[in-house]
Amino acid sequence: MKPLTAVIGAERAAGQGVFDVLDPSTGELLAQVARCGAEEVDHAVSAARDTFESTWRHTTAEHRSKLIRRLAEIVRREREALADLESHDTGKPISQARADADVAARYLDFYASAVETFHGESLPDLADGLVASTRLEPLGVTGHILPWNYPLQMVARSIAPALAVGNCSVVKPAEEAPLSILRLAELALEAGLPPGALNVVPGYGAEAGAALAGHTGVDHISFTGSVEVGTLVAKAAADNVVPVLMELGGKSPNIVFPDADLDRVLPVITKALLQNAGQTCSAGARLLVHQDIHEAVVTQLVERLRGIRIGAGFTDPDLGPLISAAQLDRVSGMVEEAAEYTKVVHGGTRHVSPDHPGGFYFPPTVFDEVDPGSRIAQEEVFGPVVAVTPFRDVTEAVEFTNGTEYGLIAGVWTQNLDVAHHMAREIRAGQVYLNAYGAGGGVELPFGGYKKSGYGREKGVEALRSYSQTKTVVLKIGQVQGQ
């Protein structure tokens, strides 16, 4: 098996050895990948800086737009191959992997278009004959430390706005799932992006990730991952006075009031639990249900879950495996602990696939009548596990919703517009859905958290501002003498 190399400028770097990437569906070796460290990160940052200063920062928005849009076309052309790679690398069902490829192309297209109307402002008629304008300029070299749950989507949503406004990027993919990101870097060169505009340095977080977060040549860091690692990244960046865009954890609720249409609610709740095996920061990990309909909702949810298919991602099941043996152990441990103090009404033990006994499978699990202050209601599990808590009224619904250290996304289900708008106003989260719920929502919707879910906003036009800086230019106009 030939190891996959890093992409640094126009070169392929072998790194300081290799690490293994396993197929979560089978537990078998999928690929060996270059293990990069501080030396490779330094080379990648230098390549990005050289391209930024010599070429990319001087290009027009129209030119950058054309190349990024061409990359989107290539991603669509390679949809099936990318989806197959993503499904084997992450274990997610192949239909979800295809959707991820489609969304990646959509991110590229969106920012290719948005940057052409991304301008500064004119501030005329100031005092003392001053006229001012603002310029929106790139930061320079942007570092992107990405997670393993949506590699292809995440890299596109992160690098598309960064490249569009004129930055050059260095990406450190998660060691569990780096394959589609490495492939995208190759496709970017095919699309005509100059070598050094997009560099990918795979490796372990403590080696390549730490080196990128603390590198003095990086002008901005984007991080998606856990609160614990995010804190370390922010501290490293702070030593260099570098801005950080943080998208961290979540314990996102669906809040169901007694007048909700359960025929609309239950399919969405089920999807929010199953999508990507629950390994989504905006997964519907909590279900807050009014006491009057609590029993009906739980009964119907469990009934839906009884018929789901669990299996290898490439067979396109309803629920694929978790990403790794370590993640399976973590989810199992949290579930076993919670089962000692609250009621399990579905799932709760590991699933062994008869076809792939080495895979990392865990069934959808429902805890009922969960104390809102308990660990299973407070901490992110990152698996197909939902904690159900009944509430009595609007006041208690708000209290339970805001009662964690996270604030990423929430869904409110009610036909009462007064209640809906009250909840939208009171919930401390970056996105609030009314009679809907999406794991992060569409490409156009700004996305980010309150509290320990992070800070800054990705997606939408706001992301262009996250990857640029404002320069104010002031002109003194002299008095016009008579003719």
Image (spheres, helix red, strand yellow):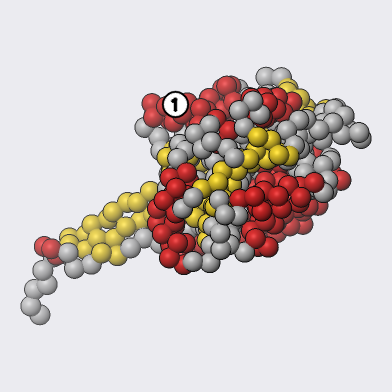
Q: Residue at x 53, y 67 (%)?
A: 415
Please state the horizontal and vertical placement of residue 328, each as a whole percent of the image: 72, 28
Residue pointed to by mark 1: 236
**Nearer to us in this view, 393 or 417:** 393
Q: Residue at x 45, y 40 (%)?
A: 403
Q: Residue at x 73, y 39 (%)?
A: 346
Quadrant of the image containing the C terminus: bottom left
Q: In the displayed structure, would residue 32 be above or below residue 140?
A: above
Judged from the image, the secondary structure of the residue bearing numbered disc 1 is: helix
Q: Quadrant of residue 350?
A: top right
Q: Quadrant of residue 379?
A: top right
Please state the horizontal and vertical placement of residue 397, each as a whole percent of the image: 47, 49
Please state the horizontal and vertical placement of residue 279, each as a whole percent of the image: 66, 39
Please state the horizontal and vertical placement of residue 50, each as a whole percent of the image: 51, 38
Q: In the displayed structure, would residue 315 be above or below residue 472?
A: above
Q: Residue at x 44, y 54 (%)?
A: 394
Query: Mark 1 packing: few (<14 Cα in 10 Å), some, or many (20+)?
Result: some
Q: In the displayed structure, would residue 270 be above or below residue 175?
A: below
Residue 222 visible in image: no
Q: How many marks?
A: 1
Question: Going by the image, does 332 lie left or right of 123?
Answer: right
